């Protein structure tokens, strides 16, 4: 939990989804994500982790604001690169916030998600994000009460989209 592991998870996913994502863009994205967590009053205190996490739109807005700040003129190229990388990585309709996946219902009733209509980058980001949400929800429920029983079974066809994902470490 906390902003730092969540930030590193997003950066890991963007790095895998956008191969041209460079070190300067990584630094800029890390700074932007951490700043949005701070603005949402989410920090190292676990009590703050139940607050709504920043959304992609919050990160984009912070970067756009920084691009118009004369004091950040030297960062303009790097910030433009960050914005271009996240816009490219998250350009798929799945990331436009037109509907949310009911994770609780998915975990309760089961289901099938077909990511095949998404771009390769979107598949990487969606699979990574979904697994993080599932694992986070299950961790919050504590230890399984019946040893040997699974709470959830996740099968990933085309699992190559998860290759190198930190979530699997």
Image: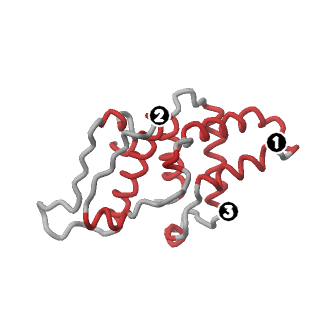
- How much space separates mark 2 and mark 3, taking CA atoms? 27 Å
**Image quadrant in which you'd find residue 153:** bottom left
Taking the spot 61% from the left edge, 31% from the top edge, the residue there is: 23
* Residue 63 position (above or below residue 136): above
Q: Which mark is residue 49?
A: none
Q: Earlier in the sequence, mark 1 or mark 3?
A: 3
- How much space separates mark 1 and mark 3, taking CA atoms? 19 Å
Camera-near label (2 vs 1) is 2
Q: Do the CB atoms of the residues marked 2 and 1 lie less than 8 Å apart?
A: no
Secondary structure of residue under mark 1: helix
Q: Do the CB atoms of the residues marked 2 and 3 lie less than 8 Å apart?
A: no
Q: Which residue is mark 3?
A: 39
Q: Quadrant of the C terminus?
A: top left
- How much space separates mark 2 and mark 1, taking CA atoms? 28 Å
Camera-near label (2 vs 3) is 2
Give the colour scheme of this rendering: secondary structure
Q: Which mark is residue 16?
A: 2
Residue that lies at the very extreme toward the left in this rendered image: 148
Secondary structure of residue under mark 2: helix
Crowding at label 1, few (<14), some or many (≥20) Cα neighbours within 10 Å?
A: few
Measured from the top left, where is residue 44 in percent x and y? 55, 63
Q: How many marks?
A: 3
Question: Taking 135 as reference, is 73 left or right?
Answer: right
Measured from the top left, where is residue 117 in percent x and y? 40, 40
Measured from the top left, where is residue 135 in percent x and y? 34, 57
Q: Toward the viewer: 54 or 91?
A: 91
Secondary structure of residue under mark 3: helix
Q: Earlier in the sequence, mark 2 or mark 3?
A: 2
Crowding at label 3, few (<14), some or many (≥20) Cα neighbours within 10 Å?
A: few
Q: Which residue is mark 1?
A: 72
Taking the spot 75% from the left edge, 47% from the top edge, the residue there is: 64
């Amino acid at each position: 939990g906390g902003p730092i592991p969540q930030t590193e998870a997003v950066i890991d996913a963007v790095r895998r989804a956008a191969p041209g994502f460079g070190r300067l863009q990584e630094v800029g994205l890390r700074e932007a994500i951490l700043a949005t967590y701070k603005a949402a009053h989410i920090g190292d205190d676990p009590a703050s982790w139940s607050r709504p996490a920043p959304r992609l739109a919050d990160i984009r807005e912070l970067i756009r604001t920084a691009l118009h700040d004369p004091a950040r003129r030297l960062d303009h190229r790097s910030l433009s690169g960050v914005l271009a990388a996240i816009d490219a990585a998250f350009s798929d309709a799945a990331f436009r916030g037109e509907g949310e996946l009911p994770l609780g219902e998915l975990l309760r009733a089961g289901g099938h998600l077909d990511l095949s209509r998404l771009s390769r980058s979107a598949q990487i980001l969606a699979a990574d994000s979904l697994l993080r949400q599932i694992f986070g929800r299950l961790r919050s429920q504590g230890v399984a009460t019946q040893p040997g029983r699974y709470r959830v079974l996740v099968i990933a066809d085309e699992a190559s989209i998860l290759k190198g994902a930190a979530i699997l470490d």
